[in-house]
Amino acid sequence: METKSIVRALAAIAHESRLEAYRYLVQAGPAGLPAGQLSELVGIAPSSLSFHLKELVNAGLLSSRQEGRFVFYSAEYEAMNSLLTYLTENCCGGNPCSPVSLDACAVTQKTRA
């Protein structure tokens, strides 16, 4: 993922309503959720939610599809995984992250300070 795409994705989820909607859609799986149901879950008006979902779609974190009268939104898992990979690629000096290695990182950071 390019730096501009990373910044756009992080900016898109840096809002309480967008983050909450995104998390519901990640949990929903590839089938996603209809906009109306997502509006109820997040607790905001459909018109406001539409604005927020557009930001997430433009950032590449969501996709939308029309099914009859309904618009379904789904998480783009590849984009999410690319973002997570970017954020963690140099974690713990390039070693796989686990609770044990994170504890070791914390000890290493303390001894360097």
Image (cartoon, helix red, strand yellow):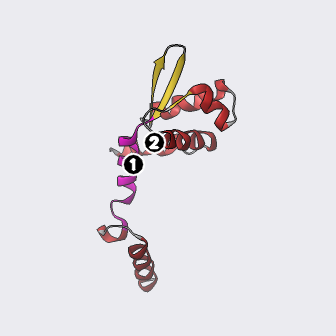
34 over 59 or under it: above or below: above
Query: Which residue lies at the image location 41% right of the left edge and 83% below the top edge?
Result: 112
Residue depicted at x 32% and y 71%: 93
| Residue 90 included in the magenta stretch of the image | yes
Q: Secondary structure at mark 2?
A: helix
Q: Residues within 10 Å of mark 2 (few under 14, many from 20)?
A: many
Provide residue 15's location: percent of width, then percent of height. Answer: 60, 43
Disc 1 on helix, strand or loop? Answer: helix
Quadrant of res 111:
bottom left
Q: Position of residue 43 (x, y in %)?
A: 69, 35
Q: How many marks?
A: 2
Relative vertical location of residue 33 with respect to residue 83 in this rendering, above or below: above
Residue ranking furthest to the top? 68
Q: Quadrant of the N terminus?
A: top left
Residue 52 screen position, x and y as percent: 58, 32
The local crowd at label 1, few if under 14, some if 14 to 19, many if 20 or more residues have their Cα within 10 Å, is many
Upstream in the sequence, badge 1 or badge 2?
A: 2
Q: Tell me what residue is drawn at x 52 percent, y 21 percent.
A: 71
Instruction: Report the span colored magenta.
Output: 75-91
Q: Amino acid at mark 1?
A: Leu
List the residue tagged with mark 2. 9
Q: Which residue is mark 1?
A: 83
Q: Decide: marks 1, 2 in contact (CB < 8 A)?
A: yes
Q: Tell me: 82 left or right of 16.
A: left
Q: CA distance from mark 1 to mark 2?
A: 8 Å
Q: Looking at the image, which residue is at 44% across and 45% down?
A: 7
Nearest the viewer among 93 and 25 is 25
Residue 3 location, x and y as percent? 36, 46
Q: Is residue 53 above or below residue 65?
A: below
